[in-house]
Image (cartoon, rainbow, N blue to C red):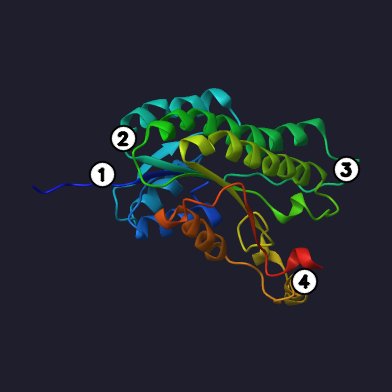
Amino acid sequence: MLIVRAMKTVIVTGASKGIGKSIASQLDKNGFKVILVARNTNQLTELADKLSNSPEVFTCDLSDTSSIKTIMPLLEKHKNNLCGLVNNAGIFIKNSFENTTTEDWDKQYRVNLLAPAMLSKLVTPYLKESTQAHKFIINISSTAAIRPVPDTSAYGSLKSALDHLTKVMALELAPYGICVNAISPGIVDTPIHSFENLDKESLDFVKSLHPLNQIGKPTDIASMATFLTNDSNNWVTGSNFTIDGGLSLK
């Protein structure tokens, strides 16, 4: 008798570009069916067309909790195959503590902390019931959570809160075999930093902040995310993996 095993399904937020796009692409190569989540439908569709395992596009404004809840039909559709969630979407508003407005705090809070919490809450009941061998939630944090940097008071504080949330979730979901971990990237070459607008001297300075003298690539973070999704890593939970070229050592 031939047994057909259902394709493992994972949700990746912020999948339209940068780290999220790299994670989604790598997971697709590893045989996952990926649900791509972001605000830009065109960018998501463009990525989906390049992937192999029948990815699905879910356009969502993660700053709007009512928008997040519209993912429920997709969760129902894939409830037997769903194995994981990667909370990658984020927003970074650089400003001094004195000049950071209430609106700046609110925007970053909604995307960087509330959205991962709400989406994880919606996904958790399905992960509890999942029969997949490895079930996981991965939160993409930042070295700014542990390394104070000027002009990042809101961003860094909220990423610190995300780190704490990761550990609490890991404790509460451990009885159900759900592994919850975080990844803290250093400075990675993504659209959020606009490195293409910097001159060579400025780029060299950014590189010099890292002991390895390199700016990170999205694939550097995707490699760790892929590691955490592997079925053999179902005894790793409550950890935060710093992938930063040594930035946090200085």
Q: Which residue is mark 1?
A: 6
**Mark 4 touches mark 3? (CB < 8 Å):** no
Q: 10 Å neighbourhood of mark 4: few (<14), some, or many (≥20)? A: few
**Disc ID at residue 218:** none
Question: Is 227 above or below relative to 95?
Answer: below
Residue at which label 4 appears: 202
Mark 3 closeness class: few <14, some 14–19, many ≥20 residues within 10 Å: few
Q: Secondary structure at mark 1?
A: loop
Q: Tag on residue 97?
A: 3
Instruction: Name the quadrant containing residue 97.
Output: top right
Farthest top residue? 66
Dot 3 or dot 1: first in sequence order is 1
- From mark 1 to mark 2, how far is it between C-alphas? 8 Å
**Mark 4 or mark 1, whichever is nearer to me:** 1
> Badge 2, how many Cα within 10 Å: few under 14, some, many 20+?
some
SS label for mark 2: loop
Task: Report the number of numbered marks.
Answer: 4
Which image quadrant for residue 230?
Answer: bottom left
- Residue at 62% from the left image edge and 51% from the top image edge: 239
- Please provide percent x and percent y for residue 163: 68, 44
Q: Position of residue 177 (x, y in %)?
A: 46, 40
